[in-house]
Image (cartoon, helix red, strand yellow):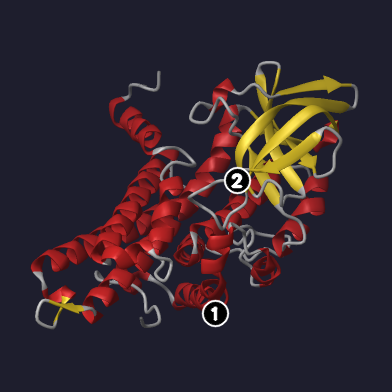
Amino acid sequence: MFPFQGVDFMGFDDNLSEQQKLVRQTVREFVEDRVLPLIKNCFREGRFPAELIPEMGEMGFLGASLEGYGCAGMGDVEYGLLMQELERGDSGLRSFVSVQSALVMWPIQEYGSDVQKERWLPRLRVGKAIGCFGLTEPDFGSNPSGMRMKAVRDGDSYVLNGEKTWITNGTLADVALVWAREGDEIRGLLVEKGTPGFTATDIHGKWSMRASVTSSLSFVDCRIPAENALPGATGLKTALACLSQARYGIGWGCIGAAMDCYETARQYTMLRKQFGGRPLASHQLVQSELAWMITEISKAQFLALQAARLRARGRLKYFHISMLKRNNAWMALEVARRARDLLGANGITDEYPVFRHMANLETVKTYEGTDNIHALVIGQKVTGLAAFS
């Protein structure tokens, strides 16, 4: 197999500035040089490559789209290309950066106090502190408004009781941004590692996202200072706004996984010969599959680009993001499945990245809003009728 050269059938790169191409190339080289040599073993061993965190911090990958506190201040396309290239390496790596950036650093900057920003953002940016985002509960995933975790005000403290689960970075995290119900209001609060009554345990036995830390969080009479509440993080809409930031990155990231699967299948079928010494790629059915893949990847690229353009103008809405995430996650998973088929028996081995991507994308299609939930978000927009119940 040959080094990755990119996937561009419809002149996508014509829409990119030199700065955007430079960002993409920088991340692409990082993935080639630092991620790909170790990710296969990480997936086998079920461990996150935490040794890469300081380097990612130094390169400006963490909180890359934010302004101030030393953050890179990337534009919307640059940030998307960062997510794309990281997920070409592995969905677990992109998930780590996405959670750190969009689900922890963004809400602290958007909703936090000056003290909270100055304490956490510089450390999170360089990877000296790790964060996680606790919204999903054992009984409430797609319906976060049903959350049972409680935050009770007691003098100058909050006392937390409840559970969160399927939390990326949970046991790695120095700080957890968790959402709890205070009376009839939902509030975001920061809970530091080591706080009495707060425990994090890893979820094992995963066949997907094996190179990612996934955890459950438990709070039993966990007392935190009242100033740990994010002043602006009140109401479920604030939590959902955080998810919109993350879903935007997922929409771009999926393209990277699809590119890797497509290019692996293209090269494999060009090199492998069967039926009288002819390359597999010379057969009609194989070309049909490759044509489908490159068409869907191209459509996904331009959907992501238009989302970035809307975002830059302040016009990107949550229902646009639902379309981006839903389409591109579906596309990438289907590309992975078709690529696996073209590789035959070799497609199930970790000599090739396809099955790893395919397994990861089963999770990506589900988390941050399932395919069906995003369909209902889009459906509500086009009909004006809510069908969630």
Front tag of 1 and 2 = 2
Relative to residue 320, is residue 65 depicted above or below? below
Callout 1: SS: helix
Alpha-carbon neighbours of circle 2 within 10 Å: few (<14), some, or many (≥20)?
few
Q: Which residue sits at x=48%, y=30%?
A: 142
How many numbered marks have been drawn onto this rendered protein structure? 2
**Which one is nearer the viewer's eye here, 374 or 232?**
374
Q: Which residue sits at x=76%, y=30%?
A: 219
Relative to residue 13, is residue 141 depicted above or below? above
Residue to which mark 2 is pinned: 204
Q: Is residue 329 left or right of residue 210?
A: left
Q: Is residue 169 left or right of residue 27?
A: right
| x, y percent for residue 267 | 28, 77
Q: What kind of residue is marked 2?
A: His
Q: Quadrant of the C terminus?
A: top left
| x, y percent for residue 96 | 60, 55
Q: Which mark is residue 33?
A: 1
Q: Is residue 131 left or right of residue 303?
A: right
**Which one is nearer the viewer's eye here, 5 or 71?**
5
Q: What kind of residue is marked 1?
A: Asp
Alpha-carbon neighbours of circle 1 within 10 Å: few (<14), some, or many (≥20)?
few
Q: Which mark is residue 86?
A: none
**Which one is nearer the viewer's eye here, 293 or 84?**
293
